[in-house]
Amino acid sequence: MHIYENEIYQEDLKSIIESDLPWNMLQNASILITGGTGMIGSVLIDAIMLRNKQKNMCCAVCAAGRNRERAEERFKQWQDNPYFRFIEYDVNVPLVQEDMKKTDYILHLASNTHPLAYATDPIGTITTNIIGLKNLLDFAVDHETKRFAFASSNEIYGENRGDVEKFEETYCGYIDCNTMRAGYPESKRCGEALCQAYKVQKNLDIVIPRLTRSYGPTLLKSDTKALSQFLHKGIAGENIVLKSAGTQFYSYTYAADAVTGLLTVLLKGKSGEAYNIASEASDIMLKDLASTIADICGVQVVFDVPDELEAAGYSRATKARLDSSKLEMLGWTAKNSINEGLRRTLAVMKKMYI
């Protein structure tokens, strides 16, 4: 079954397109989305295209990604739609599209976002987050872009210094920059600074949505985050392997809620500001997360020690909970708790993979 045909996924999309947002801003507009075949980008594209279909929004969507074959399979439901196009593009090179004279909105979602990628391609992780971002910012300046959204990460906060329970957008914790693992959070921090430079020097309207650990039925099989491994083990009927004591306390966000968060920041956020996308109802310790998935799938949780390559990509943060009150003041609320989100994710993935 193609995910777009799944009933639960269709419910997610319906929930997104019926959200209370200023959709009129996207009427007859054009939008470029990098990382288009990723977990969040693919949901965002499906939602905009479905609203085009049902609400006659006429928003031209350009999805950018490195794998055309994967894109053609993922978006086959839109291949003949005049408002959709895919361009094969590596963000590490300048974007040249002669037929794209004007692009109203750009959402830059492309990035290495899981531990194995950090460990095996640390150079690519950094260049995508800095050089790739610069290429898209230059494109935005040259193409009359109304607003640019750079998808940042909870990782920019570093380690909790023990002085707060949750990270507000102004918080800045410790990161040891002299490690390979630092490439991801440090390059995201640098990316945010680059955005502020373009805002001042190039007069570019920029907003920065900060995503926390996200999950959902569009999770890629190649994703190596702990939650992803838990889900794949559970679906396969195998015991869930916990490679620590599991006391890490993190925020998580269901993919559909992450998308409404992105759209809220894009369409309602204040220029130059960063916004956390998270929900207290999805804050959970890693051991409890593993147990919840194990209970749903009817398996057990077992403990193991990660190998050296795996450990190199893991975050050392023991508490990373985000304060979402700033985004909530714009009218956003998450519709799925961690339990509901996990149940929905597993229900879809079981039909997809089994």
Image (spheres, grey):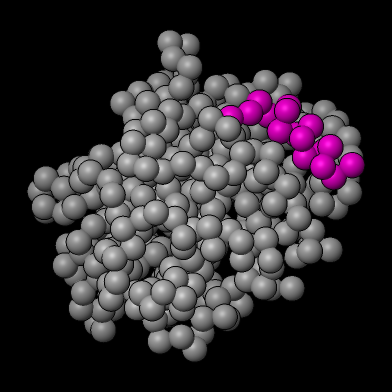
Q: Is residue 215 above or below residue 140?
A: above
Q: Residue at x 46, y 62 (%)?
A: 17
In the displayed structure, does residue 313 sit left or right of residue 328? Answer: right
The percent coordinates of residue 60 (x first, y second) are 35, 76
Q: Quadrant of residue 229?
A: top right
| Residue 259 placement (x, y as % from top left) | 47, 54
Instruction: Please indicate whether residue 334 sits to the left or right of residue 297 in the image.
Output: left
Q: Is residue 192 visible?
A: yes
In this picture, is 127 found above or below 292? below
Q: Is residue 297 magenta?
A: yes
Whether residue 36 is visible = no
Q: Residue at x 69, y 68 (%)?
A: 6
> Looking at the magenta stretch, what is its main secondary structure?
helix
The image position of residue 324, as x and y in percent, is 42, 33
Residue shown at the point (16%, 67%) measured from the top left: 144
Residue 315 on the magenta segment: no
Q: Is residue 282 above or below residue 165?
A: below
Q: Along the line of sight, which residue is nearer the eye, 137 or 235?
A: 235
- Where, quadrant-wise, is the N terminus in this rendering? bottom right
Q: Identify the residue at horizontal 82%, vertical 38% (top origin).
A: 294
Front-most of residues 316 and 345: 345
Instruction: Find the magenta span and give its range.
Output: 283-298
